Image (tube, helix red, strand yellow):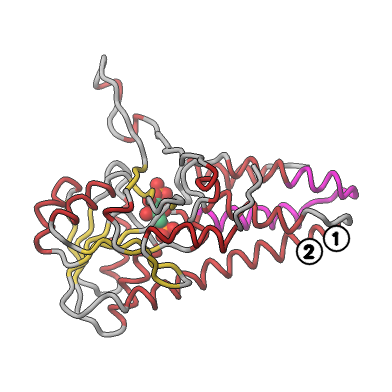
Amino acid sequence: MSYELVKETAHKIASMEIRGAAKIAQSAAQALRDFALNYQGESATNFLSELEKAGTILKEARPTAVSLPNAVNYVLLAARGNDDVEEIRRAVVNAAEEFIARSKRALGKIGEIGARRIKSGDVILTHCNSQAALSVIVTAFHQGKDIEVIATESRPRYQGHITVKQLAEQGIPVTLIVDSAVRTFMKEVDKVIVGADSIAANGAVINKIGTSQIALAAHEARVVFMVAAETYKFHPKTLIGALVEIEERPAEEVASPKEFPGVRIRNPAFDVTPPEYIDLIITEKGVIPPQAAIMVLKEEFGLELEE
Ligand code: RUB
């Protein structure tokens, strides 16, 4: 069996052609679905072990967004326990399609719930490019609320450029600033809203590098700091003491090492915002304080986790 298509998706995730925690998760589910549809063997045992291998290739593409292993595990769990090739295929296709549909529905629901927290006149600051955060902003705007957005560039990969283009296309007034201007602008901001790659059992939010500095500046200025995240962004293994791995990406994304001989260049892609700096997390199931992350994990995964 060829893993070519699975490897292609894994490569697109690793190179960030497919990026953002929700899109990464959806594309992994889609890759497993296609893998199952193309499987030509007749042994169920072999099919299951090849699916596990495909899942591992996908999970290893990027380490921080837990949406990726959560999506893969969701699909693999449905496959296990079947002992017929066609049953496995059907289970994988159904689970993958279910995951993708659930992910899209969650985004709409987060927009609807989160928009209740936005009022006319609000200036909202966002960082990076999060579909969940944008769903809240765009929904509020389409409800007729008169809002403005300030968006950071989000160095080094400039995901902020995607954000400002998406907002401008919707006709939402938007201002682009450099990441280091956040504290300067914080006095004009009413609310900060960002997405999440992972949320730990203690309510800490892992998101694009720079998020924690923004939270600190918001805290200092008493500006509300909100996170928009689907429940599959909650990290089950943090419940059993695991730490979320922070991806360190190539130095070349920051500057050319050739131009800086003798200089070490570091490029962590994400950081951790402690729960003390987060006012609320907007999920598709409702608004929770970060301290309630454990409840979400309990509901989503149960408390008896397997390694
Ligand atoms: C993306 C990022 C986003 C979250 C949430 O980082 O940090 O804020 O993934 O996004 P990268 P979404 O660009 O390195 O993948 O709400 O779209 O899932």
Give the side of residue 6 with respect to residue 251, left or right: right
- Disc 1 and disc 2 in contact, CB within 8 angstroms: yes
At 55% from the left edge and 59% from the top edge, which residue is drawn?
A: 298
Magenta stretch, residue numbers? 24-51
Q: How many marks?
A: 2
Q: Amino acid at mark 1?
A: Glu
Say which quadrant the N terminus sits in. Answer: top right
At 44% from the left edge and 58% from the top edge, which residue is drawn?
A: 293
Give the side of residue 97 with respect to residue 187, left or right: right
> In the depicted view, which residue is nearer to us: 117 or 262?
117
Label disc, if present, on residue 86 of the rendered structure? 1
Q: Amino acid at mark 2?
A: Arg
- Res. 19 visible in picture: no
Label disc, if present, on residue 90 of the rendered structure? 2
Provide the secondary structure element on which disc 2 rests: helix
In magenta stretch: residue 190? no
At 30% from the left edge and 84% from the top edge, which residue is drawn?
A: 143
Q: Residues within 10 Å of mark 1 (few under 14, many from 20)?
A: some
Task: Determine whether the beta carbon of the residue marked 1 sits less than 8 angstroms from the nearest atom of ligand 1.
Answer: no
Q: Is residue 274 above or below residue 266?
A: below
Q: Is residue 142 above or below residue 290?
A: below
At 89% from the left edge and 56% from the top edge, which residue is drawn?
A: 84
Q: Position of residue 251 (x, y in %)?
A: 34, 29
Q: Position of residue 219 (x, y in %)?
A: 19, 55
Q: Position of residue 59 (x, y in %)?
A: 59, 43
By secondary structure, the bulk of the magenta-drawn segment is best described as helix
In magenta stretch: residue 49? yes
